[in-house]
Image (cartoon, helix red, strand yellow):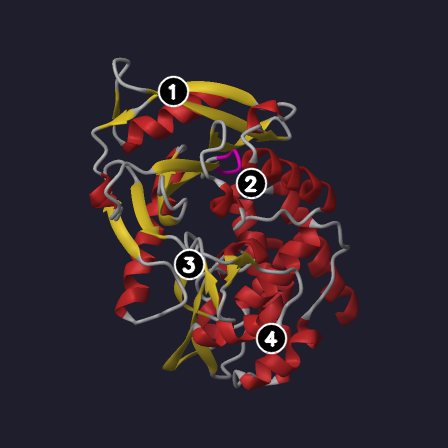
């Protein structure tokens, strides 16, 4: 899809558009030839939203600083590779039903997700006077994205019922369109180091009074283990383990460090309940090994101390890492994610060598 097609699709789903109405000017900002941001043109106060994002590769950070600086002075349209668009104003959008409480019509600042079957747009509704964002609207751009967005809505409802305080609050859901609205979480993106406050977040996801075991967990997917059957026997362990919510994509870019020192978690589209403990911790570490050029590594020893504070014996931590890797390999096979599958297979091979 071109930048114009993406923008038109997003605006059409938010409401109706009309060629007789006011024209809006936006700038499409691309990365690696893919549209990633749609910013109001010529200085329309996108800065507070952009401050909540930060790339993790050093070259991307340099480019991001240029985007933010250009937006501040209204020159985003002058950035290399940017495309200026003229769009029809959204008409008939029920902003109040989306949780917007301002008296004026908000300015949409739009992030476009990675291309693929779960691609979505994240629309930040910004006040014209305050430039503050209060509401985030998620709009599906691919068929699987709709299911993921609606699943997150169910998760956010459940978290609110359980009085969980470290996630956004759901404001609106439209099952037919696959659109949801939630509160905006203001904060700095998390860091790549597994900080002490991330252990605090993991402990906040524990479910008091509930327990599980590795034997119970592997029953769900051991029939798909295939070439990993060699390690399944080691996972047949009935030792009681604490049960928890699993965020499912516990990673620096989905963590927000708040002004008061607390943290919050965004993007609950892959969450599940109940789950084994430490799955999020291993995801945090192994995904960064994959994305930032590290070699395959095993991490269970570095999680010992934090695991013991959660009531998990050191002997179980190694098995939990194996469980994470086997389950991740099975899911990659289902989704045909060959690049990540190869990396996980390389990590599992380290376990085989140590066992030999």
Q: Is residue 113 magenta?
A: yes
Badge 1: residue crowd in 10 Å (few <14, some 14–19, many ≥20): some
**Residue shown at the point (62%, 70%) measured from the top left:** 195
Badge 4: residue crowd in 10 Å (few <14, some 14–19, many ≥20): few
Decide which of tag 4 and tag 3 comes sooner along the chain: 4
Badge 2: residue crowd in 10 Å (few <14, some 14–19, many ≥20): few
Front-most of residues 85 and 210: 85
User: What separation in Å lies between label 2 and label 3 (alpha carbons)?
Assistant: 20 Å
Q: Describe the element under mark 3 as helix, strand or loop.
A: loop
Instruction: Name the residue carrying label 2.
Output: 336
Instruction: Name the residue carrying label 1.
Output: 87
As drawn, is 96 to the left or to the right of 306? left
What span is in magenta?
Answer: 112-116
Q: Are marks 2 and 1 in contact (CB under 8 Å)?
A: no
Please provide percent x and percent y for residue 241.
48, 80
Quadrant position of the C terminus in the picture:
bottom right
Which tag is nearer the camera, tag 1 or tag 4? 1
Q: Is residue 270 magenta?
A: no
As drawn, is 112 to the left or to the right of 93? right
Instruction: Name the residue carrying label 4.
Output: 196
Q: Quadrant of residue 69?
A: top right
As drawn, is 299 to the left or to the right of 10? right
Decide which of tag 3 and tag 1 comes sooner along the chain: 1
């Amino acid at each position: 899809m071109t930048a114009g097609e993406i923008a038109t699709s997003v605006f059409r789903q938010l409401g109706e558009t009309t060629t007789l109405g006011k024209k809006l000017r936006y700038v499409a900002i691309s990365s690696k030839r893919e549209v990633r941001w749609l910013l109001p043109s010529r200085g329309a106060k996108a800065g507070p939203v952009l401050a909540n994002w930060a790339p993790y590769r050093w070259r991307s950070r340099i480019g991001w600083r240029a985007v933010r600086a250009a937006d501040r002075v209204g020159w985003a349209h002058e950035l290399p590779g940017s495309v200026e668009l003229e769009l029809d104003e959204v008409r008939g959008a029920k902003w109040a039903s989306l949780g917007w409480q301002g008296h004026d019509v908000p300015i949409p600042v739009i992030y476009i997700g990675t291309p693929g079957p779960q691609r979505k747009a994240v629309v930040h509704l910004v006040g014209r006077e305050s430039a503050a964002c209060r509401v985030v609207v998620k709009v599906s751009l691919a068929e699987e994205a709709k299911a993921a967005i609606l699943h997150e809505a169910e998760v956010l409802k459940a978290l609110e019922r359980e009085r969980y305080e470290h996630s956004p609050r759901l404001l609106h859901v439209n099952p037919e369109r696959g659109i949801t609205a939630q509160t905006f979480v203001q904060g700095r993106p998390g860091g790549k180091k597994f900080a002490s406050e991330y252990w605090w977040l993991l402990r906040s996801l524990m479910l008091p009074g509930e327990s599980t075991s590795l034997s119970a967990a592997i029953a769900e997917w051991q029939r798909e283990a295939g070439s990993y059957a060699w390690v399944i026997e080691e996972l047949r362990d009935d030792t009681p383990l604490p049960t928890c919510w699993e965020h499912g994509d516990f990673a620096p870019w989905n963590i927000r460090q708040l002004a008061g020192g607390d943290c919050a978690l965004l993007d609950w589209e892959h969450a599940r309940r109940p789950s084994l403990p430490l799955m999020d911790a291993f995801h945090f570490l192994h995904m960064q090994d994959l994305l930032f050029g590290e070699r395959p590594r095993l991490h269970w020893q570095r999680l010992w101390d934090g695991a013991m504070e959660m009531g998990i014996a050191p002997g179980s931590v190694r098995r939990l890492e194996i469980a994470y890797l086997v389950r991740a390999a099975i899911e990659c096979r289902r989704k045909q994610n060959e690049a990540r599958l190869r990396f996980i297979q390389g990590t599992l091979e380290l376990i085989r060598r140590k066992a030999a």
